Image: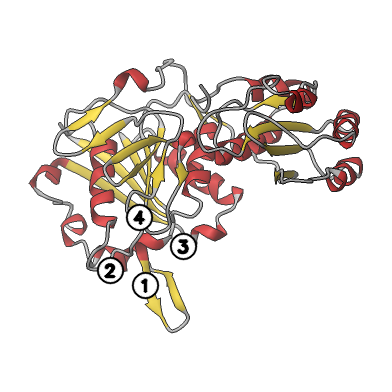
Amino acid sequence: MQSSVYILYTGGTFGMKNTTEGLQPSTWDEIIAYLPAIKNQNYFHYYSEIDFTFDTFEPVVDSSDITPNDWQRIAQSIEKNYDQHDGFIIIHGTDTLAYTSSALSFIFEHLTKPIVLTGAQLPIFHPRTDGIVNLSNAIYIAGYKHFSLPCIPEVCICFNDDVLRGNRAVKTSTNDFEGFSSPNFDNLAHLEQNITINTHLLQKNTNLPLDIKSTFSHRVVNVTVFPGYNPEILIDLVSKGKLEGIVLRTFGAGNLPSGKRWDDLFTTCKENNTIILATTQCPNGKIELGQYALSNVLKNAVVVDGKDITPEAALTKLMWVIGNYPYAERIGMLSRNLRGETS
């Protein structure tokens, strides 16, 4: 069956080249010079019936420089091409790929087509690059019609033969080809000799029109609690109206160092319409407020239980909710499982 796939190259290690100033992003033309089969739109004989549309950020961006404005640019590119394509591939640097995949998952509501993010640990120019395999696998997921595969109507990450839900993935290695993992949720698919797609895990299709909201608040912080931590600086920032949201990464199941200043922080947050999204520092498991006495302080109206959400999804969800909803709706939105980001 004929299929059409839109590929957007944003930058990152996948297309990095050596220069006198170190590794820098290449252009798409330089990349496909190493992939003549893709350039000729005849990537193996199976791909002869897939129409590719290639696009690129101008200029391309190192993933460390990705901003919410770039998330909006990616979303706008997908929206512009949505009706003409069956699936979408975003080639992205690995450092912030999990942030982008989480952000995009919240931007697109009622998604009915796969948006696949991928990249590489070694540049496409390297003789041992993982980029060719990652891109090839991403084409299978985005071009699912041609391969008679089930559609994955989600934002996902395709890396090293794994397909992960985008807002459940975290980067776990800087050099392992595995690269990413999904600590609290099973893989959406495994791309080995036989491709297995776990259809029972996929988000259900609502048949409602695609809805796109792409505003993100910059007035948020991500705070990791450490032994002896005192929230005095947070109290000062909130009291001056500089923060609308705080991701608070607690110990274990939601524990905090003891002290009266936490009550002062929550009071100040209430007075300034600031919300706290509480999460755990542990990669596996979730927070359970009240399980230990030192978590009881978080049972407050301004605190949202983040359950088993990843750090990347927590931050982007908080930024997105604040950016698109009035204060009266924010706690309710943050408490909901919007795109499969929590169990």
Circle 4 or circle 1, nearest the eye = 4
What whole-number distance in Å separates the C-alpha atoms at marks 4 and 1?
20 Å
Please tell me which residue lies in front, 243 or 148: 243
Q: CB atoms at circles 1 and 2 under 8 Å apart? A: yes
Which residue lies most toward the left here?
A: 45
Rendering quarter of residue 293: top right
What whole-number distance in Å separates the C-alpha atoms at marks 1 and 3?
13 Å
Label at residue 4: none
Circle 2 or circle 3, nearest the eye = 2
Q: Amino acid at mark 4?
A: Asp
Residue 103 in percent (x, y) is at: 54, 39
Disc 4 is placed on an element classified as loop
Q: Amino acid at mark 2?
A: Phe
Which residue lies most toward the bottom here?
A: 20
Reading the chain from its start, which is encountered first: label 4 or label 3?
3
Label at residue 60: 3
Disc 2 is placed on an element classified as loop
The figure's colour scheme reads secondary structure
Label at residue 17: 1
Residue 297 higher or lower than 128, as above or below: above
Reading the chain from its start, which is encountered first: label 4 or label 2?
2
Disc 3 is placed on an element classified as loop
Q: Which residue is mark 4?
A: 176
Q: Amino acid at mark 3?
A: Val
- Left or right: 200 as drawn, with respect to 46: right
